[in-house]
């Protein structure tokens, strides 16, 4: 925990972070998670048109928080970017990073690895190294390449259970995390360099998942799906209800490109797909419905508001295989504390068994 505690002094161990979910994780969710001793991320994604007002809102909430008001060097949240958006996004983001200096900058989904190197270099330059670099990867090869190119402070290791976008071909955390740890440890020895801290993402819903990730080599965890049930997450009631209603996520969720195609968000790198709760759009696509007809029905469902979601609905419900463990609406602070305390409890219980 030492490095994490040094970089994010208001946090407690094990670190619980909330993922930078585009359009969903805004200033409120991010601030509440940080106030509870975790690290919240604002999901800027591929569009920074509202980022300044979100970061300004975080700054305001920071002043009202006894825990966060003592943080001076950085804004006590992170910001997540989707790198496939290209050079324009970088150039629009740099002045904001320079002004607000978020504690962490999360890089994901580049079109090519040079984008990771460019974002890392420029972010460190404009923030004088104050914003730490987090890179989300899903394979051992990507972990090694990102470490060689960027020496990030943190690698977020994303397993196949993760909700939202991730690699269509990748392993679950049980095998991915230890293999990444071995590979980057070997690299650090070979190069005489520091090893990035590993944070686990994908299917972690509670203290049990967090304890498992710690024993596999992670220093902390990132949760996305679980925070969808926090009132501070910016999602429609119909979406939240669909997440709360789903169970047995290995069967009721899947990763693919159907929803990106229906929504026209097709700029993602080819290797990446979105994991969502399955509904009529997905099943009709599988049965051979034409894209045109499926899009028409999707647009009709948009007019139905909250009724457009659910098992027989059609609207996109990005969420991970852990949906069955999301059972109730809970504040972001309560989720953060429960996950962290739960992990400590499970780790103590487990160690008493050996
Ligand atoms: C609704 C939703 C939206 C997401 N959006 C983003 C995003 O904009 N950028 C990103 O880097 N990751 C995004 N992710 C993926 C998360 O970074 C993380 O890998 C994932 O949530 C972890 O798995 P979990 O959902 O099982 O907790 C999203 C995840 C979800 C569930």
Image (cartoon, helix red, strand yellow):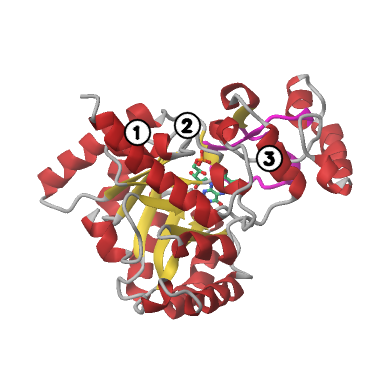
* Percent coordinates x, y for residue 327 in the rendering: 61, 37
| Disc number lying in front (3 or 1) | 1
Disc 3 under 8 Å from ligand 1? The reply is: no
* Quarter of the image where one finds residue 216: top left
Compared across the picture, whether 22 is left or right of 288 comes to left
Q: In this rendered view, identify the residue nearer to me: 31 or 162.
A: 31
* Percent coordinates x, y for residue 252 in the rendering: 64, 25
Q: Residues within 10 Å of mark 1 (few under 14, many from 20)?
A: some
Which residue is painted at 75% across and 40% down in the image?
A: 262
Mark 1 vs mark 2, CA separation in Å: 16 Å
Residue identified by numbered label 2: 160
Q: Is residue 277 magenta?
A: yes
* Percent coordinates x, y for residue 43 in the rendering: 55, 58
Can the viewer see residue 267 in this picture? no
Q: Which residues are magenta?
A: 256-280
> Residue 212, labelled with which disc?
1
Can the viewer see residue 27 in this picture? yes
Q: In this rendered view, identify the residue nearer to me: 241 or 26.
A: 241
Q: Residue furthest top?
A: 287
| Disc number lying in front (1 or 2) | 1
Q: Residues within 10 Å of mark 2 (few under 14, many from 20)?
A: many
> Residue 317, labelled with which disc?
3
User: What element does badge 1 sit on?
Assistant: helix
Earlier sequence position, callout 1 versus callout 2: 2
User: What element does badge 2 sit on?
Assistant: loop
Q: Is residue 172 magenta?
A: no
Earlier sequence position, callout 3 versus callout 2: 2
Q: In this rendered view, identify the residue nearer to me: 14 or 53.
A: 14
Q: Residues within 10 Å of mark 3 (few under 14, many from 20)?
A: many
Mark 3 vs mark 1, CA separation in Å: 27 Å
User: What element does badge 3 sit on?
Assistant: loop
* Percent coordinates x, y for residue 190 in the rendering: 11, 44
């Amino acid at each position: 925990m030492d490095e994490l505690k040094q970089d994010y002094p208001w946090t407690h161990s094990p670190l619980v972070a909330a993922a930078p979910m585009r359009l969903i994780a805004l200033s409120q969710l991010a601030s509440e998670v940080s106030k509870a001793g975790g690290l919240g991320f604002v999901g800027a994604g591929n569009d920074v048109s509202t980022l300044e007002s979100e970061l300004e809102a975080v700054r305001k909430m920071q002043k009202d928080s006894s825990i966060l008001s003592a943080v001076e060097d950085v804004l006590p949240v992170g910001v997540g970017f989707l790198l496939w958006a290209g050079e324009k996004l970088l150039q629009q983001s740099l002045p904001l990073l320079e002004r607000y200096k978020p504690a962490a900058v999360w890089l994901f989904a580049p079109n090519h690895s040079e984008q990771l190197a460019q974002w890392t270099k420029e972010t460190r330059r404009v923030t004088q190294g104050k914003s730490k670099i987090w890179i989300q990867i899903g394979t051992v090869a990507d972990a090694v390449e990102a470490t060689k190119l960027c020496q990030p402070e943190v690698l977020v290791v994303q397993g196949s259970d993760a909700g939202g976008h991730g690699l269509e071909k990748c392993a679950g955390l049980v095998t991915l995390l230890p293999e990444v740890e071995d590979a980057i440890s070997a690299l650090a020895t070979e190069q005489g360099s520091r090893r990035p801290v590993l944070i686990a993402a994908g299917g972690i819903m509670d203290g049990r998942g967090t304890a498992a990730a710690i024993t596999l080599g992670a220093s902390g965890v990132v949760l996305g799906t679980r925070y969808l049930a926090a009132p501070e997450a910016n999602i429609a009631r119909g979406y939240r209800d669909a997440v709360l209603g789903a169970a047995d996520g290995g069967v009721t969720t899947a990763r693919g490109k159907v929803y990106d195609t229906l929504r026209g968000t097709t700029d993602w790198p080819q290797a990446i797909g979105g994991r969502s709760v399955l509904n009529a759009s997905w099943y009709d696509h599988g049965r051979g419905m034409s894209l045109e007809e499926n899009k028409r029905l999707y647009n009709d469902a948009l007019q139905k508001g909250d009724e457009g979601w659910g098992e027989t609905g059609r609207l996109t419900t990005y969420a991970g295989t852990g949906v069955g463990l999301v059972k109730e609406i809970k504040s972001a602070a309560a989720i953060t504390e429960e996950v962290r305390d739960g992990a400590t409890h499970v780790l103590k219980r487990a160690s008493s068994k050996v």
